[in-house]
């Protein structure tokens, strides 16, 4: 029994693939990591209070930032690393405050 070959991509699909490959060739890992750090910090802050409060997720965001920020040193502008280190410090303080407000036995 012969295996069926996948259909050839259409011209528009081929153009889309080529555009994606061009975008990927321009993308730098440092840019992706910087965007990731921004996203993690935003999500972490949202998990510190309000209806989306989830201290375990906030703690995970803090730990992820602590792991990623040293990797960015020397790969992105020093101001960006400095700013995100300040964000991390602020998140840690906010986490400590939120954790202190939690009733015993909950998290």
Image (tube, rainbow, N blue to C red):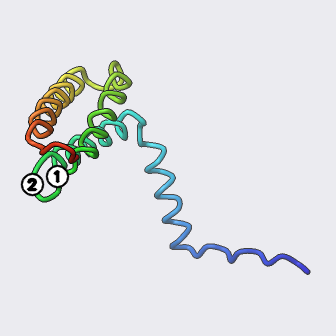
67 with respect to 24 (left or right): left
How many numbered circles does the render carry?
2
Location of residue 39 in the rendering, given as x and y in whole percent from the top left corner: 26, 45
Helix, strand or loop at label 1? It is: loop
Circle 1 sits on which residue?
A: 53
Pick the residue in front: 73 or 7. 73
Q: Residues within 10 Å of mark 2 (few under 14, many from 20)?
A: few
Vertical comparison of 37 with 85: above or below: below
16 with respect to 104 (left or right): right
Cα separation, mark 1 vs mark 2, equals: 5 Å
Q: Residues within 10 Å of mark 1 (few under 14, many from 20)?
A: some
Residue drawn at the location 11% of the way across and 49% of the way down? 49
49 with respect to 56 (left or right): left
- Residue found at the far front of this picture: 104
Q: Quadrant of residue 58?
A: top left
State yes or no: discs 1 and 2 in contact (Cβ < 8 Å): yes
Residue drawn at the location 28% of the way across and 46% of the way down? 57
Helix, strand or loop at label 2? It is: helix
Vertical comparison of 20 with 79: above or below: below
Residue drawn at the location 21% of the way across and 45% of the way down? 105
Location of residue 61 in the rendering, given as x and y in whole percent from the top left corner: 28, 40
Badge number at residue 39: none
Location of residue 78 in the rendering, given as x and y in whole percent from the top left corner: 24, 20
- Residue found at the far bottom of this picture: 1
Q: Quadrant of the N terminus?
A: bottom right
Residue drawn at the location 12% of the way across and 30% of the way down? 93
Circle 2 sits on which residue?
A: 50
Location of residue 26 in the rendering, given as x and y in whole percent from the top left corner: 43, 42
Pick the residue in front: 13 or 30. 30
Vertical comparison of 78 with 93: above or below: above
């Amino acid at each position: 029994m012969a295996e069926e070959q996948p259909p050839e991509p259409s011209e528009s699909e081929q153009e889309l693939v080529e555009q994606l490959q061009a975008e990927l060739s321009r993308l730098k890992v440092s840019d992706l990591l910087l965007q990731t750090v921004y996203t993690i910090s935003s999500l972490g802050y949202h998990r510190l209070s309000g209806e989306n409060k989830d201290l375990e997720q906030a703690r995970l965001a803090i730990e992820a930032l602590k792991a990623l920020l040293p990797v960015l040193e020397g790969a992105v502008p020093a101001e960006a690393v400095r700013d995100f280190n300040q964000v991390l410090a602020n998140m840690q303080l906010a986490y400590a405050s939120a954790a202190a407000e939690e009733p015993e036995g909950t998290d």
